Amino acid sequence: MTGETKATISEIIRTRYADLTRKERKFADTLLANYPVAGLASITEVAKKADVSTPTVLRTAKKLGFKGFPGFQSALRAELAQTLSSPITKHEQWADEAPAEHILNKFATATMDNLSSSLRQIDYRTFDKISKLLADEGRKIAIVGGRLSHTLADSLATHLQIIRDDVTLLSASPSRWPHHLLSMKKGDILVIFDVRRYETNLTDLAKIADKRGIKIILFTDQWMSPVSARASHTISSRIEVPSGWDSSVVTMFMIEALVASIETNRWPQTRARINELEEIFDATRRFLKKP
Amino acid sequence: MTGETKATISEIIRTRYADLTRKERKFADTLLANYPVAGLASITEVAKKADVSTPTVLRTAKKLGFKGFPGFQSALRAELAQTLSSPITKHEQWADEAPAEHILNKFATATMDNLSSSLRQIDYRTFDKISKLLADEGRKIAIVGGRLSHTLADSLATHLQIIRDDVTLLSASPSRWPHHLLSMKKGDILVIFDVRRYETNLTDLAKIADKRGIKIILFTDQWMSPVSARASHTISSRIEVPSGWDSSVVTMFMIEALVASIETNRWPQTRARINELEEIFDATRRFLKKP
DNA sequence: ACGGGTCTGAAAATATTCAGTCATTCACTT
DNA sequence: AAGTGAATGACTGAATATTTTCAGACCCGT
């Protein structure tokens, strides 16, 4: 689609500037002076700002080779979109050896898009608050996931257990949940992973936990699980990929970033724990030396 | 950030996102996905691109606190003009509201780098071969992971079990592995996840499996687990992030891409299985409707 | 200063958009 | 399984934007 030597509109204007009449130049000048935003309003406003009449603007647009004012404007927009798209996202092909339509490339594009728009959407203050909450060893933590998001819950639990005490991964089967809730007190934390299709069990669990004064932190997708009504803080990720189901990659990213943030918040304790762990593992000789 | 009290429109959307309805979010999403250009066309075009009706777009604009669509749009333009006039274009920043040194931004940069260099390195023919092998229902599949990579193994197992029969996730504890190996025959497949620090147990397991003629598929990191000597095919990912340990995001990506590829290779069977599953889940009423 | 041509904007004609209303659909509740 | 209330989109008239038309203004030569 790209690859052509497509001239920008400002270039076209410069090239054809000699052909323009006095008022046409006045319009062209104001456009270039505040390029390209000055051209994105309605023709009336644009004309008024350049202090020319609407027909003049229209004639200029046509002279520059566009169908009409809307055509001119959409060309401006397209050009702007090109400029604004981040250098990484606009990559057309990722695994350059593979054909563009190979699943690796399609998947990579979708994932990059997901990641960058999730990041654009996230509120880093929320992120920081969650990080603080999870770092607070005065609060017990329980983590639970749904059918497919269970592995994400598992992953968060595994990492948090390295960092701090009192982290429990609730089993996948809801029958044991009430028992766990009993052992939690007000101010403790329940982390819920719920992506579509949202599970009624989790919604119910959230309701009960909320009533008991347990803080709920929710990881969900862009469509927001109903649990969000009960949650103190929510992190939502984009999860659509060209596949029969949804992607966990971005949520995994969020988990890891969060864990890294918590780790930073309580580095002295974390380091001590990691060292202890390392010693234990060294003693059991279950691991090869670090490369 | 800049310390001004003026909220950008993307911020307003983030803040009020919870108040938006399904279709309103869809519009907000498409706007954020291509921000702010996606909002600069006429309301009709904008609505069509977001696949919602014009009233929905209008309602959203009003909900966000604007007078009407034109008001909303001119706010977008004003903001864009502001952004474009500022001298520094922030390229390395992902969560634009957050400071550049915020962990989210550092993590995002690292992850994007990891993903793109892993993709540049991967041989798509290997990828396709693995996809074919795992799609072959004549071969039983066993999946095993290490201490931290266990969740990855779990994830692959969960997805593969949806697609096909004879997929087993080996438990985290090595004592039960020999038993499993006994039930596998020549030509069956053992998928091993091993990232640093590499576990001797997994190396031993690979040796035994190899001797029995079991094909080994390995997911590892850029430094390559010793298992790779025994593996028929290896997929390696970059895993370094600014954190005390390594990232699973890219490996997760590989898993999902692989599953999507397998799914495509045997779509008729997969579709049948998924439909069956959906029916079962519908019957148990454990899920809410799709958004 | 005059006449031929081009340029320009007022205003009319046309097309499009905007913002309501209302019936339908959809998601969830009992 | 049916009911309920919110969400959504087709439709509509009013408003606005775009385009065309055309008469007058302007520039240039003589």
Image (tube, coloured by chain):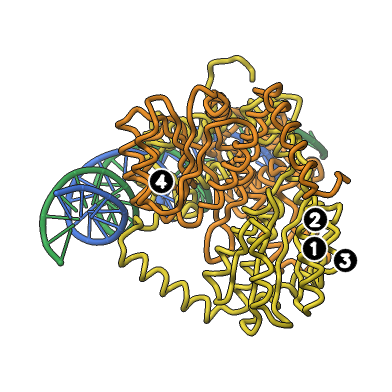
Chain colours: A orange, B yellow, C blue, D green
Element at label 4:
loop
Query: Is circle 2 on the same chain as circle 1?
Result: yes
In the picture provided, is A248 more to the left or to the right than A100?
left
Dot 4 corresponds to which residue?
A225
The span from disc 1 to disc 3 (Cα, nearest Å) is 12 Å
Q: According to the image, label 2 marks what residue?
A: B200
Q: CA distance from mark 3 to mark 4?
A: 45 Å
* Residue behind mark 3: B229
Instruction: Please state the horizontal and vertical placement of residue A104, each as a whole percent of the image.
Output: 71, 64
**Percent from the top left, x then y, of residue A11?**
79, 43
Q: How many marks?
A: 4
Pointer 3 or 2: first along the chain: 2
Going by the numbered disc 1, the residue's amino acid type is: Asp
Are dots 2 and 4 on a single chain? no
Question: In terms of depth relative to the viewer, which is nearer, A164 or A61?
Answer: A164
Q: Are dots 3 and 2 in contact, CB under 8 Å?
A: no
User: Would you identify the image quadrant in which residue A97 lies?
Assistant: bottom right
Same-subunit check for callouts 1 and 3: yes
Q: Residue at x 66, y 45 (%)?
A: A81
- Judging by the rendered image, the residue that carries numbered circle 1 is B204
Q: Chain of mark 4?
A: A
Query: Marks 3 and 2, Cα distance to the nearest angstrom?
Result: 14 Å
Q: Disc 1 or 3, which lies upstream in sequence?
A: 1
* Label 1 element class: helix
**Disc 3 + disc 4, Cβ < 8 Å:** no
Residues tagged 2 and 1 counted as in contact (Cβ below 8 A): yes
- Which mark lies nearer to you, 3 or 2? 2
Residue type, numbered disc 2: Thr
Kindly identify the residue that appears in the image at 52 percent across and 69 percent down. Answer: B162
Q: Chain of mark 3?
A: B
**Disc 2 element:** helix
